[in-house]
Amino acid sequence: MAEAKFHTPKRKRRVYERYESPLPIPFGQDHAPRAFRVFRAEMMDSHVIVRDAEDMAQLYGRGYFGKGTLSRSRPSFTASDPQVAARWKDMKTDMPIITSEKYQHRVAWAAALLRRQGQGESAVHRILEDYTRPLELPGVHRRTEGPQQDAHPSGETSVPEAVAGTWDHSGTDGHSERSEETGDPSQLSGPTPLTSNGLSLGVHLAENTAPLPLVSGSGGEQQEAPGLPYGPSHERVLVEEETRGGREDGSEDSPAPAQERKRLVCRRNPYRIFEYLQLSLEEAFFLVYALGCLSVYSGKEPLTIRKLWEAFTTAQPTFRTTYMAYHHFRSKGWVPKAGLKYGTDLLLYRKGPPFYHASYSVIVELVDEGGVGSQRRPFSWKSLAALSRVSVNVAKELMLCYLIKPSAMTAEEMGTPECMRRIKVQEVVLSRWVSSRERSDQDEL
C-alpha cells in the first residue's frame, strides 16, 4: 500500500478573524498558575447548549467549538436591521435599530403569545401598550455635532435626523441621500399609535404590570433571569419611525406642507429572540473529558463523565465511534466538524473554518483486530466512487478512519470512555486512479 502524501491545506482568500490560542490545558505545578475557567452548558433533549455570552465567545473563539443556533458558525445574531443601521451609523449606540414594520411584527408575536397564555384581548392590549411605550434615550448621541435632541411631552427622545423626502441608497459615503429641504427637529410630532393586527394599543394600563415572557432562539418560552446572554441593550431597541410635521422656515406665519421625516424612538423589545451556542455531543464530551473545562447540567446537577457517556450513547447510537475519531483528530491539532453536507462523518480543518478550507472528509468505522465488524455504512464500489468524486470536486481528500478494538473487548468495557486506551487507529486516504494521468507521468520519467 502506497504511503499517502500530505497536501498543504488551502487557505481562504478573505480572513476576517484573528486567530486565538486554543483553550489552555494545565499540565503541572511547575508553571505559573493561570486562571482556569469552567464553562457551563445544559443538556436539552439530545442537544447541548451554552447560554452565557462570555462562555459562548470563549468556546467558539478558542477552539471553534459549536455553532450559533441562529448563525452559520460564530454566534453573531442581532436583531438590528443592517440597512437601517447603515443609515444611522453615525449614532453612538449598541442598541439594535429596526424598522417600524419589524417592530410591529414583534408586537403581534408577543400578543399571540399572551393570548396562548390565557390573557384576554383587553389585558393583552393594556400590557403591550405599557410595555412598548417610548422610553428615554440616555447616553446615546451622534458622533458628529448637531442640534440638541428635543424631548416630547410623551417622554420619548427622538434623534435629530429628520430631513424631508425619501431615503436614497445611492450615496457613496455610506450615508443615505435625501432631498435638500430640511426641517426643524423640534417640530416633530409624537409617535403614531402602535397597532397589532389592526387593533390600537392606546388603552392605558394600571401600574405594576408583569413583564412579558421572553422567547429563546429555539422557539421555547422562558422567563427573564440573571445570566442570560443579552443585557439591557438588547432589551431595548431603536425603532425607525416616520412622522409628519415641521415648517420649512420655522416661522409660524407661513405654513409649510407636511413632510415625512424619519427618527429613532427607543422602545422595549416585546419579543426577544436569543441565540445560544449549540455543541455537538462529541465537542461537549471532549471539553468535559479531555480538557475538563465544561460542566454539562441536566436540571440543577452536573452530569458525571460516566453518565454523559451513557446519555450521549443513548441519544446518538454511533456516539462512541464518532467520538473516538473526534478525540483522535483533535489531539493531533485538527478542528473536526460535522461532515454531513458532504456525506461523511467529519471534516478536518487546520486552525479553524475561518482560516482554511477543510482538508479531509472522514468516514469512521469500528472493526476488530481481524478487520471484521458490522459496518456503519456499507459501501459498494459505485457509492464509494461517487463519494470520492464529491470529495475531489470540493477540493478535499477522502479518508477512511478505522478504529481497531481488541477482539476480546466486551460491551461492558465499551461502556466507559476508558476503553479508548485499547483502541488503535488506522488512517487510509482514498484517491482515484486516472489511467491517462498515470501514462503521462510515466512518459515524463
Image: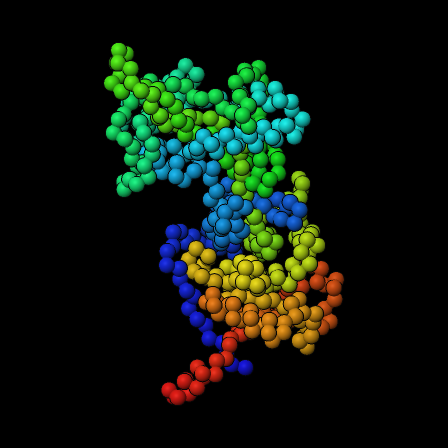
In which quadrant of the rendered image does the C terminus lie? Answer: bottom left
Vertical relation: 416 (above or below) 146: below
Vertical relation: 34 (above or below) 271: below
Q: Tell which of 258 and 320 is nearer to you.
A: 258
In which quadrant of the rendered image does the N terminus lie? Answer: bottom right
Does residue 39 show up? no
* In the displayed structure image, the side of residue 345 where residue 353 appears, left or right: left
Q: Tell which of 382 and 35 is nearer to you.
A: 382
Does residue 375 show up? yes
* In the displayed structure image, the side of residue 181 where residue 325 appears, left or right: right
**Farthest top residue in view:** 253
- Quarter holding residue 11: bottom left
Vertical relation: 442 (above or below) 244: below
Taking the spot 48% from the left edge, 70% from the top edge, the residue there is 392
Taking the spot 52% from the left edge, 67% from the top edge, the residue there is 390
Taking the spot 66% from the left edge, 39% from the top edge, the residue there is 300
Residue 126 point in image, percent of width and height = 57, 19
Taking the spot 56% from the left edge, 71% from the top edge, the residue there is 386
Residue 79 point in image, percent of width and height = 47, 37
Report the label total. 0
